[in-house]
Amino acid sequence: MPAAVPDPVALRIPGLSRALSLRVHGDEDRYISRQIRAAGIWEPYETTLVLASLQAGDVFLDVGANIGYYSVLAASRVGVEGAVLAFEPDPGNFRLLAENLQLNDCAGVVTAFEAGLADKTRPGQLYLSEDNAGDHQIFAAAAGRRELPITLYHGADFLRARLSRLDLLKVDVQGAEYAVMSGLIPLLLDLPRLPRIILELTPLSLRQAGSSGRALIELLATLGQPLWIIDHIEHRLAACTREELAQWCDNVDTVEGDMGFMNILAGPAVPGARLGGGDRIHS
């Protein structure tokens, strides 16, 4: 488990209504924590989209919340009139998540669960990355990873009594996205309005977890929402079809070990976002 940096890191994000800071992991975490320490921000374009998607009174569901970066940002946007629900099964990440909620006075807005979501309620195993606290997985893709028992909840069953609306859903769970969405879709279809959904699409990890990129896209398409590639290079949303995304997944799957990934959005375009076609789908 990476050691935590003792002093909070100030976030440097344009448009924040108040100063925010995070406790992060030490040098052992070579990705999320290191980037936040260096730049005061993680995933700049996705950060912009999350903040632009939320307003006071909204509800945000953060599945794979890690140390609470997006949960803290969302809480600053939705305020006490809104709500944030955060799920993080790793004890080391969850400890920092809880500290960051307290540090930023989010306790009355964010409810955090030391658990994951899935397509059924069951015990699970989490296989830990030693150098990337954002790459813990529910499958044993590589030998030698330390493992620990975790709790997984069926999303709809667990949240039905806790959610009457949902404005934004973010899912980043290292290959478990299909299981998470399978468990959540019965609830989403019963809500007055579908949320925008931001999720990571990594075909190799999805296959290692027992599904596939194409299966995830086909599942997402049952909601009938527009699909967009989150183009973090050009900082725009690129419109795409279900089949274009599914074919991209198939193409990635033809190359053994290809870790190609993208973040995608399902739902209406985010207010103020630059829009474009899907010409980056094959890059």
Image (spheres, rainbow, N blue to C red):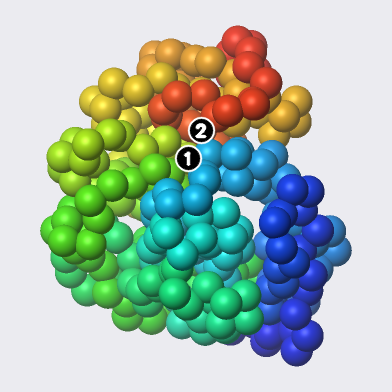
Q: Which residue lies at the image location 23% right of the left edge and 51% below the top edge?
A: 164
Callout 1 secondary element: strand
Residue 117 visible, this orientation: yes
Looking at the image, which is closer to me, 131 or 99? 99
The tag on residue 264 is: 2
Side (left or right) of 41 relative to 73: right
The spot of residue 22 in percent (x, y) is: 69, 73
Residue kind at label 1, given as amino acid type? Ile
Q: Which residue lies at the image location 57% right of the left edge and 44% below the top edge?
A: 50
Residue corresponding to mark 1: 198
Spatial distance from mark 2 to mark 1, Cα to Cα? 6 Å
The spot of residue 139 in percent (x, y) is: 37, 61
Residue 97 visible, this orientation: no
Q: Are marks 2 and 1 in contact (CB under 8 Å)?
A: yes
Side (left or right) of 166 relative to 262: left
- Callout 1 crowding tier (Cα within 10 Å): few <14, some 14–19, many ≥20: many
> Where 28 falls versus 6 (above or below)?
above
The spot of residue 184 in percent (x, y) is: 24, 48
